[in-house]
Amino acid sequence: MPRKKTSIWFRGLELLARMSDTRPKKKAGTHKAGPPKKVSAARPATRADEPRARRSPWVQTAGTTGRWIRSYHSAPPLAGHLVNHLAYALYLPATAAPDAGMPLVVMLHGCKQTAESFAAGTRICRLAERSGFAVLLPEQAKTAHAQRCWHWHGDLAQSEAPAVASLVEAIERQYGFDRERVYLAGISAGAGLAAALAVRYPTLFAAVGLHSGPVFGAARSTMTAVNVMRRGSREDPVGLIDACVDVATYPGMPAIILQGELDTVVARHNAMQLGVQFARVNQLLDAQGALRVGEIRTYSGEAVEYTDYLRSGRLLVRVGVVRGLGHAWSGGDPSEPFHSARGPNATAMLWQFFRRQRRSMERQLRRSPA
């Protein structure tokens, strides 16, 4: 991104962040250290162009006994990209076995976060250990964006989406994960990129989870990105999604969307518009945004207001607005920036939604004129 655009983007984020109730970023070296981890040798890569994974310097995450692998992926070159290396962290639970065909959850961090801080704040690895899935955390480089923001808006080819998709495919092959149970989630800018990946690469993922993310397709520049985050889109969200995909042949994408009620960085209107967009790609809504099949249920839980889109009794899209929550991961570790103890455990909510989805099921959706 040109320096001028980057500085404008950062100033916009700083302005919005000052209005939010999130904790300031901790200084380097302030992460809590757990007991020393037991590290086993990493499996060698099976592709010649994949680097040999190396041991991670991370301390063992409390409550886990698996292993971390830190490495990088060399994605195919793109026009205008001199170097297309993408760093990542991979967590393999202790129950992992070669070619076991376990599920994989891909997690995309937000601005000012790293793979380490996002993993710690969401406590995703503890859940992975208990539930038997692996976790892949791509990491944005500071050389690509000074605040580690993903480029979720504008031209897809100029974003990190192709590199992340290439990484997911390579990791699937290398470790023998179940290709029908690969799930994607992100927060803030990471949710923006996750939405783009889910829409553009639907055969890679069985479901997507978006936390505090902007509506898809409305932001085409740095300045419009800030406006979209603040207010949502003034354009019809159905029209935005229809401009990008052929809904009649799209294989479907179950989605769970979570949002803080008091988020002043990404307005809650974005979550409602995302819900409409994913209801559309799952062929629940027609081109005018009216319900064409299934049903919509709205109800309030103890801490969350829900809007559910169902087809034949099956939950395909859920939008949850968490009461009293700002721009932060619900039910996370508050010692990490952009994570809050307030609200239900978003990590558990995402996995409960994901575990019921398989990509093969999406191919069975009846494809009819939209």
Image (tube, rainbow, N blue to C red):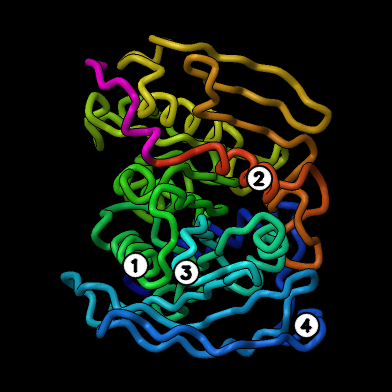
Q: Quadrant of the N terminus?
A: bottom left
Query: Which label was assigned to residue 138?
Result: 3
Check whether the beta carbons of the residues at disc 2 and disc 4 lie within 8 A of each other. no
Q: Quadrant of residue 278?
A: top left
At label 2, the amino acid type is Thr
Near mark 3 (Cα within 10 A), the count class, few <14, some 14-19 or many ≥20, is many
- Read off the residue under disc 1: 173
Q: Earlier in the sequence, mark 4 or mark 1?
A: 4
- Read off the residue under disc 2: 264
Element carrying mark 4: loop
Q: Is residue 259 magenta?
A: no
Magenta span main SS: loop
Q: Earlier in the sequence, mark 1 or mark 3?
A: 3
Residue 114: give x, y in percent of width and height. 58, 73
Nearer to the camera, 7 or 246: 246
Q: Residue at x 46, y 59 (%)?
A: 101
Element carrying mark 1: helix
Which marked residue is nearer to the observer: mark 2 or mark 3? 3
Residue 56: give x, y in percent of width and height. 58, 87
Q: Residue at x 47, y 17 (%)?
A: 311
Check whether the beta carbons of the residues at disc 1 and disc 3 lie within 8 A of each other. no
Q: How many numbered discs sit on the rendered protein?
A: 4
Give me the C-alpha separation between circle 4 and circle 1: 36 Å
Element carrying mark 3: strand
Magenta region: 360-370
